[in-house]
Amino acid sequence: MNQIKQALKSKTVQFSIALAVLSIAQGYVGFLPVSPMGQAVAGCIIASCVTVLRAVTTVPLNQK
């Protein structure tokens, strides 16, 4: 349980959880009418966010 609490302090993990929730909501509800080009742009933005979050990571999860 302690390891889960530590992981939830990570901005990368928080971003991943938010992305998963939005992906599930989009799949079931379809609240964002997005074209294939829009999906490609969103994918690039998500990849960029993950890269930035990884670059600012300074400590492992078990040390948070």
Image (cartoon, helix red, strand yellow):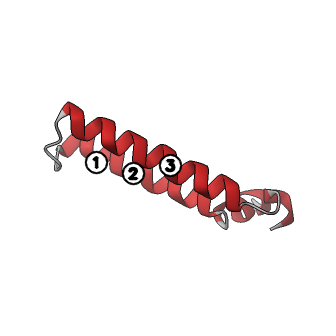
**Residue 59 location, x and y as percent?**
82, 62
| Name of the residue lying farthest toward the top | 36
Q: Are marks 3 and 2 in contact (CB under 8 Å)?
A: no
Give left or right: position of 44 versus 11: left
Figure quadrant of residue 58: bottom right
Figure quadrant of residue 64: bottom right
At label 3, counting other C-alpha atoms closer than 10 Å, the crowd grade (few under 14, some 14-19, many 20 or more) is few
**In this view of the protein, which residue sits in the foreground, 4 or 40?**
40
Residue visible at 44% across and 56% down in the picture: 18
Q: CA distance from mark 2 to mark 1?
A: 6 Å
Task: Residue 48: give its label.
Answer: 3
Number of numbered discs on residues: 3
Query: Label 2 belongs to which residue?
Result: 21
Q: Amino acid at mark 2?
A: Val
Q: Is residue 20 visible?
A: no
Of tags 3 and 1, the one toward the viewer is 3
At label 1, counting other C-alpha atoms closer than 10 Å, the crowd grade (few under 14, some 14-19, many 20 or more) is few
**Residue 30 location, x and y as percent?**
17, 43
At label 2, counting other C-alpha atoms closer than 10 Å, the crowd grade (few under 14, some 14-19, many 20 or more) is few
Query: Label 1 belongs to which residue?
Result: 25
**In this view of the protein, which residue sits in the foreground, 27 or 39?**
39
Give left or right: position of 7 versus 49: right
At mark 1, the secondary structure is helix
